[in-house]
């Protein structure tokens, strides 16, 4: 009787049963994310709180039985969590991705070579569509190119949901999820955690967080801004919709088809970027607007979400003209001729998307960590620092690398003798860590290819 009295029956509510809907085949599509209009511009209201956990596998390399058992355990654990919390922002959304070390060291080469997606080079399959991350022209000398086996990205409108799920997955002992005792959720013995990275992405949150922590430049952040740099990150027309970032969807990027093992999977990039907030806000609003988007934008300070519709796309000719005649390159404009289709395009699923449609997806979020909450392989400072944990999805790592190199703008900068402060906003960013991952479909999110060995 005493045990019954101590049990919190009021906490036992299975919110998962409130949700009925089709679960996406991809991991990166986010069920339940609503859209609002900001001055007639559609903006996705993404989950408020985020955490990323990176790790290396603790199981012995070459132990096929152990890898298959690990796959079963992780599948069961994720299914148990999603039976308790709804697959929506008010529950929890979990994405699992794998670094090249996993495919090189735990999957036999003959299996990996057979199934891994390959980038198309001159129309023929070439290298794997997941590569090691590289340094770009304006990267700092101390940039860390990481070699993690796996990463988990947790998202929710409730920070407590994330913390409880992380404890249940990675810490041994009795745990409660949504008031329900967990069983068979702990998988922490399979991993050695290398980092824990936390942050947020919500209307007005950057200014509030920065002011409370006394971060220099906080008072300059627009009150409603979603990101530290003052503009909205989740424009619907600035984010790839549906399965556009998947390996197979847009013809010409990889050898994958809708029947391939890694169909509905994608290349995922993860990095941490510190922001020089004071330097950025020394520039007036028109200057920030044009450096964020392009040199022809004229919206006022009250517009934090300028349109990103296909007809606003900057292609190469306009970009060259901006550099030559306006002596300024906008961040978005630097990359759009690669991150958007340059003609009306039919996907492998028969959908026709118009010229200027974006095929790159961002799920970045703000952080005040310096650089992480926990870092097994480097120092962590208690001094809060504004930054972003950047997560992006593209059909191939080769495409991502091309896009990211354009962000540095070295060629046009040299050609037209542009100062650093007029070349996008890389002058105000310092990348500290970077890695490429493969994010498989939901069907293969638990140790992909393990069942093939």
Image: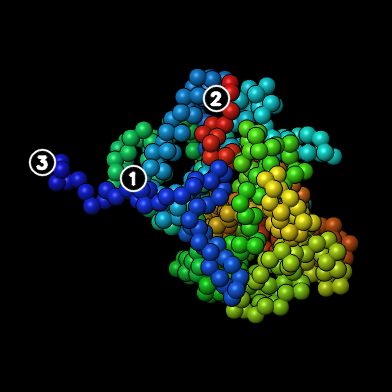
Given the current orientation, which residue lies at the most extreme front position?
A: 350
Task: Report the residue at 69% width, 48% height from top.
Answer: 350
Q: Specify which label sits upstream in the sequence, 3 or 1.
A: 3
Q: Specify which label sits upstream in the sequence, 2 or 1.
A: 1
- How far apart are labels 2 and 1 at the CA level? 29 Å
Identify the element where label 1 is drawn: strand
Task: Report the residue at 57% width, 31% height from top.
Answer: 448
What residue did someone put label 3 on? 1
Q: The N terminus lies in which quarter of the figure?
A: top left
- How far apart are labels 3 and 1 at the CA level? 23 Å
Residue 183 picture location, percent across and down: 33, 35
Decide: marks 3, 1 in contact (CB < 8 A)?
no
Identify the element where label 2 is drawn: helix
Residue 355 picture location, percent across and down: 76, 59
What residue did someone put label 2 on? 451
Identify the element where label 3 is drawn: loop
Please give left or right for residue 13 compared with residue 218 in the image: left
Residue 430 picture location, percent across and down: 65, 56
Q: Nearer the viewer, mark 2 or mark 1?
A: 2
> Which disc, if any, is residue 223?
none
Please give left or right for residue 281 compared with residue 160 in the image: right
Task: Report the residue at 40% width, 51% height from top.
Answer: 19
Q: Specify which label sits upstream in the sequence, 2 or 3.
A: 3
Please give left or right for residue 191 compared with residue 297 in the image: left
Task: Report the residue at 41% width, 36% height from top.
Answer: 77
Residue 85 picture location, percent across and down: 38, 48
What residue did someone put label 1 on? 177
Q: Is residue 151 visible?
A: no
- Kindly indicate the quadrant of the structure image that contains residue 284: bottom right
């Amino acid at each position: 009787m005493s045990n019954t009295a101590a049990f919190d029956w009021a906490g036992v509510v299975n919110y998962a049963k409130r949700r009925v809907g089709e679960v996406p085949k991809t991991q990166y599509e986010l069920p339940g994310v609503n859209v609002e209009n900001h001055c007639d511009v559609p903006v996705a209201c993404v989950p408020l709180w985020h955490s990323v956990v990176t790790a290396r596998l603790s199981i012995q390399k070459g132990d096929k039985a152990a890898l298959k058992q690990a796959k079963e355990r992780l599948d069961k654990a994720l299914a148990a969590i999603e039976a308790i919390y709804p697959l929506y922002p008010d529950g929890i959304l979990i994405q699992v991705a794998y670094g090249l070390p996993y495919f090189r060291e735990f999957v036999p080469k003959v299996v990996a070579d057979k199934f891994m997606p390959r980038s198309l080079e001159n129309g023929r399959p070439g290298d794997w569509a997941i590569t090691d991350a590289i340094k770009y022209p304006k990267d700092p000398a101390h940039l860390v190119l990481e070699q993690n086996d796996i990463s988990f990205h947790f998202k929710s409108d409730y920070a407590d949901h994330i913390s409880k799920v992380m404890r249940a997955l990675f810490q041994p002992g009795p745990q409660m999820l949504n008031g329900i005792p967990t069983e068979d959720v702990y998988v922490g013995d399979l991993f050695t955690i290398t980092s824990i990275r936390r942050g947020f992405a919500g209307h007005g949150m950057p200014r509030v967080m920065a002011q409370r922590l006394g971060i220099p430049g906080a008072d300059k952040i627009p009150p409603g801004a979603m990101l530290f740099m003052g503009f909205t990150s989740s424009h619907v027309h600035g984010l790839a919709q549906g399965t556009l970032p998947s390996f197979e969807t847009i013809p010409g990027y990889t050898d994958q088809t809708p029947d391939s093992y890694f169909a509905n999977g994608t290349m995922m990039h993860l990095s941490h970027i510190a922001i020089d907030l004071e330097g950025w806000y020394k520039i007036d609003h028109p200057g920030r607007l044009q450096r964020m988007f392009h040199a022809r934008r004229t919206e006022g300070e009250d517009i934090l979400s300028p349109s990103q519709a296909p007809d606003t796309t900057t292609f190469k000719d306009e970009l060259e003209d901006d550099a030559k005649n306006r002596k300024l390159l906008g961040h978005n404009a630097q990359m759009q001729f690669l991150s958007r289709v340059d003609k009306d395009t039919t996907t492998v699923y028969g959908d026709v998307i118009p010229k200027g449609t974006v095929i790159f997806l961002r799920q970045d979020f703000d952080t005040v960590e310096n650089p992480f909450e926990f870092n097994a392989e480097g120092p962590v400072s208690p001094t809060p620092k504004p930054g972003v944990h950047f997560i992006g999805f593209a059909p191939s790592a080769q495409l991502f690398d091309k896009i990211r190199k354009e962000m540095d703008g070295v060629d046009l900068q040299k050609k037209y003798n542009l100062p650093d402060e007029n070349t996008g906003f890389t002058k105000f960013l310092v990348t500290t860590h970077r890695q490429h991952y493969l994010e498989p479909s939901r069907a293969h999110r638990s140790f992909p290819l393990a069942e093939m060995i």
